[in-house]
Amino acid sequence: MKAEILRRRKGFFEGQLLEVLTPSSDRILARCSHFGICGGCTYQDFNYQKQLQEKENFVRESLQKLGGFVDPPVEPIVPSPDTFFYRNKMEFSFADQNGKLVLGLHERGHFEKMFDVNVCFLQSERSNQIVAFCRDYFVRAGLPGYNWHTHKGFLRFLVIREGKATGEIMVVMVTSKGEADLKAWAEELAQKFPQISSVLHLVNPTKAQVATGEEEIVLWGQSYIKEKIGNFYFYLSAKTFLQTNSRQTENLYRKALELSGFSGKERVLDLYCGAGTISLFVSPYSKEVEGVEIVPEAIQMAEKNKKENGVENVRFVLGEARKIAKQYRLDNRRFDRIIVDPPRAGLHPKVIRDVLPLGADKIVYVSCNPTTFARDAKLFVERGYQLKRVIPVDMYPHTFHVELVGLLELDHRS
């Protein structure tokens, strides 16, 4: 291949592909007509089995190079049950480009450029139909899209959430401050698509290009939808975090459950519990579970999920993981199992310091970033734990992202 070197880094180069001279036998024809333009699905022209192999290798190499593990215990990757139409949430961007309203996704390598999406194979056919309807509606209505350079314009994001198991759909419109008759749009949308049970309006008055807002208005239906993971139903609001691959999330949680090795007598601490999905999922197999989360809306939803599923042995605590872990250390609290599912940045060193005295025989670490997991696993091992198992899980087919769940076990010999 021919490539242009853009940056020289220590130990590697970053570049841009110019031309493929001899295609690999693993290269296939991408299904999507937007491939090459769109910033997502960069592996879509890559044989899926080869994708899995590369992701598994990435996890292993991260542990070797960044964690110092000579022969890391990486197990075969868990493939996604669906390679297309697997996402339960998509964010589409509005933009004013040369006076034209665009509703779609970002061009590859350009945060400020969008293109109209005709068909996307990530969420569902229904999602594509909703996007097309909304684009046509607002072109007719003459409402302006957001301009990333001037920071003017009304329409900013269209977010679609689907309960893959329940069939319920939520549509969220994110706008700047301003007056517009979005009620009429919501009613026409809901009439066109009877699967929709929630239409919301979020107002984002800031320049930050994030698909959320300070003010939430229910335009039609309810303020939430439901999704089912395993035997549990979970409420999803506009701001609730849930892994975007619902079917694979159940497999991920089952692996976390397997690694936990519950007997039914364990006291469990679940840090970064979000809306309580993992806490509730492991609750039938443990004595008691305590979930910790810093986002108030997530804790509120966790309590709602707890009540919906009739769970009695789970308690949720609002607070920062670092502060709560420190307080538990000072209070001499003890837990048999600790489950962590932190953001991409991984665990703060002080969190690691403070969970060590809590005495857990096993720490189950769910990670969306193998590099920060490798860093953190090394710190745990230096402080008396052994890295026993690492299971990569493919949550995002056709992308370079890979999730994993790891088991760190207390070495009683140290």
Image: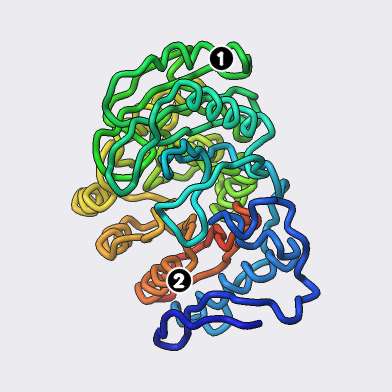
Circle 2 or circle 1, nearest the eye: 1
Type of the residue with mark 2: Ala
Q: Which residue is mark 2?
A: 374
Quarter of the picture containing the N terminus is bottom right
**C-beta proximity under 8 Å, tags 2 and 1:** no
Q: Position of residue 15 (x, y in %)?
A: 50, 78
Quadrant of res 347: bottom left
Q: Is residue 181 above or below residue 150?
A: above
In the displayed structure, does residue 227 sit left or right of residue 180?
right
Q: Nearer the viewer, residue 13 or 55?
A: 13
Residue, x 65% and y 71% (percent of image)?
54
Residue, x 33% and y 34% (percent of image)?
153
Type of the residue with mark 1: Ala
Q: In the rendered view, how is the structure colored?
A: rainbow
Residue, x 40% and y 42% (percent of image)?
273
Q: Position of residue 36 (x, y in %)?
A: 62, 60
Q: Seen from this angle, which residue lies furthest front?
A: 99
In the displayed structure, does residue 324 sit left or right of residue 120?
left
Q: Position of residue 287 (x, y in %)?
A: 47, 38
For marks 2 and 1 on the same chain, the one whose residue lies earlier in the sequence:
1
Quadrant of res 357: bottom left
Mark pair 2, 1: CA separation = 46 Å
Disc 2 element:
helix
Q: Nearer the viewer, residue 330 or 146?
A: 146
Q: Position of residue 180 (x, y in %)?
A: 35, 18
Mark number displayed over residue 129: none
Q: Which residue is mark 1?
A: 190
Q: Residues within 10 Å of mark 1 (few under 14, many from 20)?
A: some
Q: Residues within 10 Å of mark 2 (few under 14, many from 20)?
A: many
Q: Is residue 122 above or below residue 218?
A: below
Quarter of the picture containing the C terminus is bottom left
